[in-house]
Amino acid sequence: MAAVPAVVVVLAGWRWRWPAGFDRLVWIPLRSSRRRRRTYRRHWDLAMDASGLVRMSGDVRRVPPLVRVRSSRSVDRVRVEMLPGQVLDDFAAVADRLAQTFGALDCRVHSVPGRPHRIELWMLIKEPLEQVVQPWPTTVEDLTRGVPVARAEDGQVHRLMIIGSHVLVVGATGAGKGSVVWSLLVGLQPAIAAGLVRVWAIDPKGGMELSLGAGLFDRFCHGDATSASYEEAFAGLLEDAVVTMRQRQDQLRGVSRLHAPTVDEPLLIIVIDELAALTGWVSDRTLKKRIETALGLLLSQGRAVGVVVVGAVQDPRKEVLPMRDLFPTRIALRVNESEQVGLVLGQGARSRGALADRIPERLPGVGYVVVDGIAEPRRVRFSYVSDEQIAEACRKHSKALAAEEVAA
Ligand SMILES: Nc1ncnc2c1ncn2[C@@H]1O[C@H](COP(=O)(O)OP(=O)(O)OP(=O)(O)O)[C@@H](O)[C@H]1O
């Protein structure tokens, strides 16, 4: 008993001095064990039964075993062994019931890599993405590792792999589409300064959205009152990108299947702020055809040769965005209707927990990311890049260019 105060002081000091280590080694194991006993073990049989996940084999009643619980401050990750014949979708279909039974805000069902018989139920105890996320400092290497752009629900950094992938961002007005685009572009600044990435930007809103970062772009195309037809300029830019793509295809034919960015052959990123202005709303038929043809060619053939498209749009319907299935990375921020989730993230994404239509307005920048080849959508919050941070990235970039000129 005499040692108790000393232990408490040591623990308090540890927590104060090294909070991350304390959380990992003391607080999380203690909390996990308590939540496992008091919340999950106690109600497990009842919850499985009430959700229709119990099976009878002959006279034997079989309940999917609870394997372990890992708790953070906002999420309990509950690992479950599925019974023979059960699949992830059986649990996803009753996720709402499970959340209600265990008193969670929400329940998401994830597969466990390398363990096909197991799944993880992520029980949200408190909104884990409440905090605004600051952008991460980045280096040139992040181009190949994936650019850190968002924080995931489990606290991990979400990296966006831009080499070899077109990216589609969908969200209602004010959902935070800008923060996705700027998290990526500002994160790429070191690679842009190193000459490994070139950005061509199209901003059909007269330059309102992207002009702050114009210092990062090699080409910037926006409509203004003096342009007779700015759609003509958009078509021209896309057709130039197709020419670059064709030249690279000639060079790479028989040499390599995936382009690796170099200073001579950088990754070319075409950023389009409002895709619908190029695909849905162009009234001139000839221009519309030219834009659609060029965009279709880039989306279907560009990524292997280092020409990728990053596009944002409010409305994902086919009439507005006919080629949305050609984007391997798709991001749904807050959308207005539940049907839009499937249009963006694919059939079944909503029943697997991607409730993009339920993201509250007070959480701009929160959304679900789906990457082709990975089964479950990931809920993340993109970093919020302020105007000052965009300006700073442009300043750094022009300094790097000036230093290069002096060196030359
Ligand atoms: N990741 C974020 N974190 C915190 N706040 C954000 C984030 N992204 C955006 N916001 C806030 O939400 C507001 C709207 O964001 P933004 O302009 O990016 O939305 P949008 O989807 O591009 O809308 P629109 O289609 O109307 O242009 C911003 O002014 C900002 O205050």
Image (cartoon, rainbow, N blue to C red):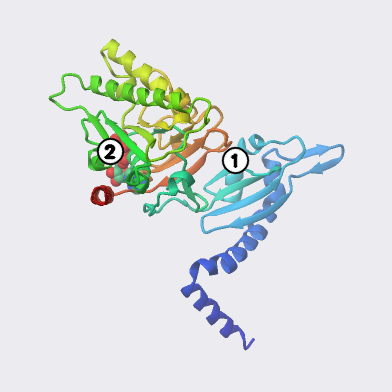
Q: Tell me which amino acid carries mark 2.
A: Phe
The structure residue drawn at horizontal position 37% and vertical position 37%, both measured from the top left corner, is: 264
Callout 1 secondary element: helix
Residue 95 circle label: 1
- Residue lying farthest left? 226
Which residue corresponds to the image point at 76% horizontal and 45% vertical from the top-left?
Answer: 63
Q: Earlier in the sequence, mark 1 or mark 2?
A: 1
Q: Quadrant of residue 26?
A: bottom right
Q: Secondary structure at mark 2?
A: loop
- The answer to whether one can see residue 359 in this image is yes
Mark pair 1, 2: CA separation: 44 Å
Residue 229 figure quarter: top left
Q: Position of residue 61 (x, y in %)?
A: 81, 42
Q: Residues within 10 Å of mark 1 (few under 14, many from 20)?
A: many
Q: Position of residue 201 (x, y in %)?
A: 29, 33
Ligand 1 position by quadrant: top left
Quadrant position of the N terminus in the picture? bottom right
Amino acid type, label 1? Ala
State which mark lies toward you, 1 or 2: 2
**Residue 218's spot in the image, x, y percent?**
27, 36
Q: Which residue has dot 2 on it?
A: 217
Q: Is residue 67 left or right of residue 96?
A: right
29 or 357, which is in the foreground? 29
Most extreme residue toward the top is: 285
